[in-house]
Amino acid sequence: MALPDFKLNVEPSELAPLAARLTEHNYTEEAVRNLLRLHDNGELIGGQIPFYQWMCQTNPSPLATLTGFFLLGEGLGREELLELLGLENCLALDKCNAIVGFDGVFTSQVVLYPCQGHYFFTDYWYTLGHQTEGKIYEIGTDSYVLARTTPRVGVKNALDLCTGSGIHAIMSAAHAPSRAVDINPRALEYARANAALNSVKVETHLGDLFEALQSEEMFDLITINPPFVPSPDPDVVLIHRSPGETGEEVSHRVVASLPDRLREGGLFSMILEYPVMADDPYVDRLERWLESDGTGWGIGVLWYVEKSLGEYVVQHIGPVQSYQETFNKYLQSYLTHGIRAIRFANVFIRRLPAGTPNWKAMEKATWPKSDVKDDILFWLDSLTTYNDPGWRPDPEWRPRLSRYFKSCWRDWEDERGLLEVSDDNWIPTTFLDSQATELMMRIKSGEKTIDALRADWLQDGEDQDSFLAALRALGALRALE
């Protein structure tokens, strides 16, 4: 299937007004999701296009018309399109080869996704099965989740690898100078157009990961949505989808380069599906790829969904001549490499001061369907603070139960406790050991200072080390504010 020759053939200022027009018509992430009854906007399914079209027809509005035109491939008459978008916006889209007309009816050659208050052009999502070489990856679930979870406040310079449409470089560009790298020249065309649409500047580089940059360049934030689908078939190992037999070939290379690319205090944020290996936890693999001596890195993994091998193969092999043969080939390859399941996850790696012991954390989390950047930052800051052996609390601090939890319970034998999560929490119910539970019960009211809590603890026959260990445990679990 031929791909459109989409390019930024206008001045950036000529494309930017389109975003305001889309916002005016409520073409937003949440509104589209509600209109089409989607779990998430990255979950569009080709076989359900008639249903999506019907939902637009039965809920007529500018939002429904835009959704049909930019997401579902529906045509619009000249006058209707002009009324919806305005003449100048239509001319800009035409010059960029985004729209095409025939006999008075116009269609969009590209998809236009809303995401986190921004807009992004990509190639059409329902051509995925064709895997056309050079195709620009649609704004899928992975892209949406990475956009919602990556903290960017305070960043001085940012880099996005495997940028595709440029979504994550553009999200960063609202906060700091941002650069985008991709091995696909079409991707950089889309990234430049999307930067113009969102009224930001992004510096683009054609090349293979860090090789496209100067050797000495380092960054405060590095984002990546890499290819990650394990594939034993070299004919379908595509630059935007399948990097090799384990699916870790690209992510391994990038993580191994972080010591030379990520500044102290900087953050690496990656979204992917990773293979669950027998007897080799993922956080341990990440630490090993960093070639760490046990210091200098904080590694946090939030995983959302785990899929069995059979389920995963069915979702990814697509239309093939011999389905059974291909299914068995993929399954056997996964088992040969020790893969036991596949998890969809966020990876966060923070560079700590030299000599600071590494920390590692892995948690199952609730799928983030809204902006949780502040929550992620609080989680990473808590892990960094309370795992630092040099940390000591301010004596006047009056700790209290954080907003993420509404109560603490303990069992009848006082052997362990349970932190009951708040209703809108993105993390699961959390269990505590007996000492952390005891300290939490004393903290709950938030009335006593650390010095007073410590004095009570020692008076009851406990020691200083157990007090600090319990306090650290609660802090690392985001239980304290």
Image (cartoon, grey):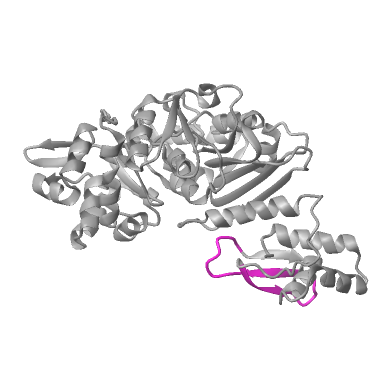
The total number of labels drawn is 0
Q: Residue at x 70, y 70 (%)?
A: 400
Instruction: Please name whichever residue, 52 or 312, is drawn nearer the observer in this view of the structure.
Output: 52
Provide residue 166's location: percent of width, then percent of height. Answer: 41, 37
Horizontal side of residue 180 vs 44, given as left or right: right
Q: Is residue 42 visible?
A: yes
Q: Is residue 239 visible?
A: no
Q: Residue furthest left?
A: 103
Provide residue 269's location: percent of width, then percent of height. Answer: 56, 42
Query: Is 423 colored magenta in this rendering?
Result: yes
**Vertical side of 241 occupied by 198: above or below:** below
Q: Quick one: quadrant of the N terminus? A: top left
Horizontal side of residue 396 vs 166, given as left or right: right
Task: Give the extent of the magenta segment.
Answer: 405-428
Q: Residue at x 54, y 37 (%)?
A: 157
Instruction: Please name whichever residue, 214 or 368, is drawn nearer the observer in this view of the structure.
Output: 214
Q: Residue at x 62, y 47 (%)?
A: 301
Instruction: Please name whichever residue, 255 or 158, is drawn nearer the observer in this view of the structure.
Output: 158
Q: Residue at x 40, y 57 (%)?
A: 39
Residue 425 in which image quadrant: bottom right
Provide residue 422's location: percent of width, then percent of height. Answer: 58, 70
Provide residue 137's location: percent of width, then percent of height. Answer: 38, 37
Residue 54 in which image quadrant: bottom left
Horizontal side of residue 458 vs 256, given as left or right: right
